[in-house]
Image: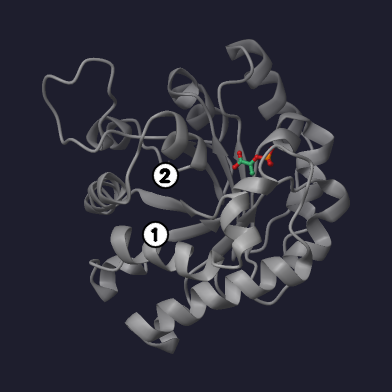
Amino acid sequence: MRKQIAAANWKMNLTYQQGEALLDDVLDERIKLQPHQQVVFAVPFPYLIMTNSGLSDEKNYFAAAQNCSDKKAGAYTGEVSVEMLKSIHVGYCVIGHSERREYFAETNQSLAQKTVLCLEQGITPIFCCGEPLAIREAGTQNAFVETQLQESLFALSSEQITGVVIAYEPIWAIGTGKTASTEQAQEMHAFIRSSLTAKYGAELADDISILYGGSVKAANAKELFACPDVDGGLVGGASLVAREFVQIIRALK
Ligand code: PEP
């Protein structure tokens, strides 16, 4: 069975102490994960070491960065390289979240570079894709998402693509309280898998986890994750509340 993942995206929220308390509250639940289930905490850079040490005794729990540089190293003040993340044993990195695309002008091309750098260091990229509201209303969301995949991922080899996790996050559903319906989520996830199949073959496409993101909460996680092509979620707001995120983890199939 392919990996089923509950990924928390704390964004630029919580002090260090609040983050530590939240992590403890989630871990205190002692949720028993199946071997194919994983929990990921995408935390602010300065909290990565704390998160990693908090998770050191936990199997199938990982710390993630929310971003990385598209450059290897050098005179790029304020940037954080993938090699730096690797040196503190970060397991995952979110790539191309829509907030980074929108507010920091990240392009499909720079995201392709970030993805390759992560794969070279053995860090699993959680590659985000998804359409804005105007594209959904025009009914051209499939073509929009396919271009994101083609321009950022489809130069990867078969071996490389198996190391990628994809997160479909319709922008109109992020932080808005408006969730995609299970039909909308399943339809897009199936479309993404069919694009992967066309490029890499069915066997490989079947192994790639595709997470849904966009106002996932305890009340809707089970229904969304039950869709055959939805392999868990990337969760913003609800991941900041321990009892919500715990329920979301428990909703993994
Ligand atoms: C996200 O941050 O990726 C996200 C989906 O946020 P929210 O769950 O708050 O919509």
Compared across the picture, whether 247 is left or right of 41 comes to right
Q: Quadrant of ligand 1?
A: top right
Q: Going 64% across and 20% down the picture, which residue do you hit? A: 19
Tell me the SS state at disc 2: loop
Q: What residue is shown with label 1?
A: 148
In this rendered view, identify the residue nearer to me: 176 or 64: 176
Mark 2 or mark 1: which is in front?
Answer: 1
Quadrant for the C terminus in the image: bottom right
Compared across the picture, whether 180 is left or right of 109 comes to right
Residue type of the residue flagged with mark 2? Gly
Q: How packed is label 1: few (under 14 Cα within 10 Å), some, or many (20 or more)?
A: many
Compared across the picture, whether 233 is left or right of 77 comes to right
- Give the distance between the C-alpha atoms of the residues marked 2 and 1, in whole angstroms: 10 Å
Q: What residue is shown with label 2?
A: 96
Asked which quadrant contains residue 82, the reply is top left
Asked which quadrant contains residue 11, the reply is top right
Tell me the SS state at disc 1: helix
| Cβ atoms under marks 2 and 1 closer than 8 Å | yes
